[in-house]
Amino acid sequence: MLGLAKGLKYTLKNMTKEKVTYQYPEEPIPMPDRFRGIQKFYPEKCIVCNQCANICPTDCIQLTGKKHPDPDKKGKVIDTYDINFEICILCDLCTEVCPTEAIVMTNNFELAEYSRDDLFKNLEWLDENDQNIREENKA
Ligand code: SF4
Ligand code: SF4
């Protein structure tokens, strides 16, 4: 009986305390400011300089460019941009070297897939990966 009373007392005391759990996945988990999550890509900002692919330690970025569609403008525009998340270590180096911030880290960490092939993410997927973008990286 004493044990029951002790248990009830403990329960009642903790019912009024602030919750430390989240209703994940319905409620997103707030990540720290410097969390390195899955990249967001802004194709319109990319100048096809290849620096991200060159610095990548795991060689998981593949990109191609094409001539600018406007004949009056010089340089290239991005044509394809793929990241293989099977081997990406989310080290942040690609985003650090990008001169135009065309590629940025987000706070998104949800990348579970049933197939390894689904871990290859293309330009369209990376462009649409705009959940949980850090405030300073919003276009
Ligand atoms: S985060 Fe690192 S491993 Fe992943 S694509 Fe960028 S440079 Fe490569
Ligand atoms: S470093 Fe930036 S601008 Fe250069 S190719 Fe990569 S994403 Fe594009």
Image: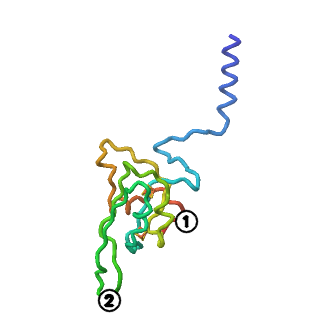
Q: Nearer the viewer, mark 1 or mark 2?
A: 2
Split into quadrants, the picture shows ligand 1 in the one at bottom left
Which is nearer the N-term, disc 1 or disc 2? 2
Amino acid beneath label 1: Glu
Instruction: Residue type at mark 2: give it.
Output: Asp
From the top left corner, tell me how far across and down residue 57 is, in percent: 44, 56
- Assess disc 2: are there few (<14), some (14-19) or many (≥20) residues with their C-alpha within 10 Å of its C-alpha: few
Kindly state the secondary structure of the residue where label 2 is placed: loop
Q: Which residue is mark 2?
A: 72
Disc number for residue 124: none
In the image: residue 134, left or right of residue 38: right
The residue shown at (36%, 57%) is: 83
Q: Nearer the viewer, residue 64 or 118?
A: 64
Task: Give residue 68's position: percent from left, percent from top.
Answer: 31, 80
* Rendered image quadrant of residue 113: top left
**Residue annotated with mark 1:** 136
Q: Residue at x 41, y 54 (%)?
A: 58
User: Helix or strand or loop: what does disc 1 sit on?
Assistant: helix
Residue 128 locus on image (x, y percent): 38, 61
